[in-house]
Image (tube, rainbow, N blue to C red):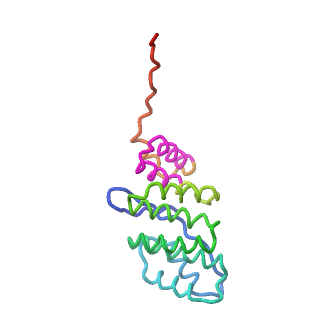
Amino acid sequence: MIRLLAAGAAAVLIGAPAHAWGAAQRPGPACFDAAQQAGPSARGIAACSRALDSRHLAPHDRAATLVNRGILKAREGSFAASIADYDAALAVDPGLAEAHINKGIALNALGGHAEAAIAALTAGLALHPANAAIAYYARGIADEMAGAVRDAYADYNQAARLAPDWDAPADELRRFAVVRAKKSMAA
């Protein structure tokens, strides 16, 4: 499921939540469920925080819960706070693709952090995420912010190939014109 969140003139993605928790632990599922829903959720953030207070939380579950809380904070527009959660998740589990990708998305939303967003999204893509189209699309946004138009085109194109039913990458690609340079006939 792909969600968009408006932030200024550009659309900002909210990446996929990270799955965590066993059935017997109540705050974890509430946190995950809130992260899967559209829109901000103060209750979801509270559920995530309660889950994180548990001393019995396995490291992967802690990292996933931090990602989910970060997603909920991003939906509220608290991008710096969401990045803090993603960084905390990465400190626990550096191999969690969703943490890298959501961090890159939040950096895009903050603006002025294109290179850091590209690095985070590239790290997430290297981990072969389940929904790579989101990461390619978000990296395309960061590429454009950095002035790397060819890279942006390539990333939007890859997102469109991976998610052909998703309109956003195709809409971005329509803004591009591929121009071939003529060879000079100088002697």
Q: Residue at x 44, y 52 (%)?
A: 141
How many badges with numbers are in the image? 0
Q: Residue at x 44, y 42 (%)?
A: 149
Q: Position of residue 161 (x, y in %)?
A: 56, 46
Residue 153 counted in the magenta span? yes
Main secondary structure found in the magenta portion: helix
Q: Is residue 140 above or below residue 39?
A: above
Q: Where is residue 68 in the image (x, y as percent from the top left)?
A: 53, 74
Residue stretch rendered in magenta on the structure: 136-161
Q: Quadrant of the rendered structure where residue 8 is?
A: bottom left
Q: Residue furthest left?
A: 8
Q: Which residue is drawn at 42% across and 82% down?
A: 42
Residue 95 counted in the magenta span? no
Left-right relation of 112 to 52: left
Q: Where is residue 35 in the image (x, y as percent from the top left)?
A: 51, 74
Of 173 and 69, nearer the camera is 69
Q: Residue furthest front?
A: 187
Q: Position of residue 134 (x, y in %)?
A: 52, 57
